[in-house]
Amino acid sequence: MTGVGKRGAARARSAAGAIVGSVVLLAAVRVLAQADPDQQLMEALLQEGTLLQEQTSNLQPVAMQLDAERKRLEAEEVQLSDEAAEVTKRFQEFNAVADQLNASMKQQRDECETGTSKFQSEVDACNEKALALKAEGEKLSAQGKELDRLQDDVNQRIVRHNAAGREWNRRMQEHQERWMPRVQEVQRWIGRFSDFARSDTFSQVALSAGNPSDCSDDRLGALNPIDTLPSLKRALQCLRALKAGTS
């Protein structure tokens, strides 16, 4: 029974909070209703524009991180492409040397394995050449292992780069799904503000506010829905100047 009583009290407090919230909201509506219609329009634009500015500002850090990551991935792709091309070139050079060495070894065997030489000097020369070719082969084998290591390293980094690129694409798509609706809302808001700025009401309010410089033709004439955030900022500066001048 005690638990039921507590839940009932919690619901009562929640209901009381909702009533208080409604009273505050109704009070705000009454204040706007008592205001001049022009003042209402200006205040509505200011409140909506301020909210949109806050929403887009909250998304800006993510956009900056994604842009920085994009630049990093692009630079990394160039570097990896250069390194992969260099490894390929070195493999081509290595294979050419290996082919030449194999041909020399075959020639040496053909010349020295006949067993027809009657001179020890010729036998010694064949043996020396065989040892030299063997040493060259061992050196080339070590170079091949190093090239294999370099190739594996580049390939692994390419795999990690591609995975990072896919993750960036996922995050960018997720960000765009949140960003683009906000931008479209801002563009529509700029259209409504521009309509207001071209109205006789705006001219009268601006005159009453002392024609603030933030509302000059030079400032507002540059508004462009495509240049979304700077246009939003300039429009809000004008509305705040009008509000301050007419309060």
Image (tube, helix red, strand yellow):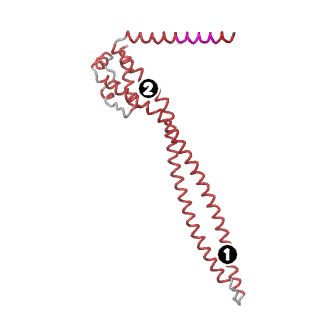
Q: Which residue is the extreme one toward the bottom? A: 118
Magenta stretch, overall SS: helix
Residue 52's disc number:
2
Q: Distance from label 2 to label 1 (Cα)? A: 78 Å
Reply yes or no: does residue 129 show up in magenta.
no
Placement of 160 over or under 140, stated as above or below: above
Left or right position of 194 against 139? left
Three-letter code for the amino acid on which mark 1 is drawn: Ala
Three-letter code for the amino acid on which mark 2 is drawn: Leu
Identify which residue, 138 or 152, lies in the foreground.
Answer: 152
Q: Which residue is the extreme one toward the left? A: 200
- Residue range of the region highlighted in magenta in the rendering: 7-18
Placement of 228 over or under 204, stated as above or below: below
Residue pointed to by mark 1: 132
Identify which residue, 178 or 134, lies in the foreground.
Answer: 178
Placement of 131 over or under 140, stated as above or below: below
Quarter of the image where the N terminus is located: top right
Residue appearing at x 52%, y 50% in the figure: 77
Rendered image quadrant of residue 196:
top left
Placement of 39 over or under 80, stated as above or below: above
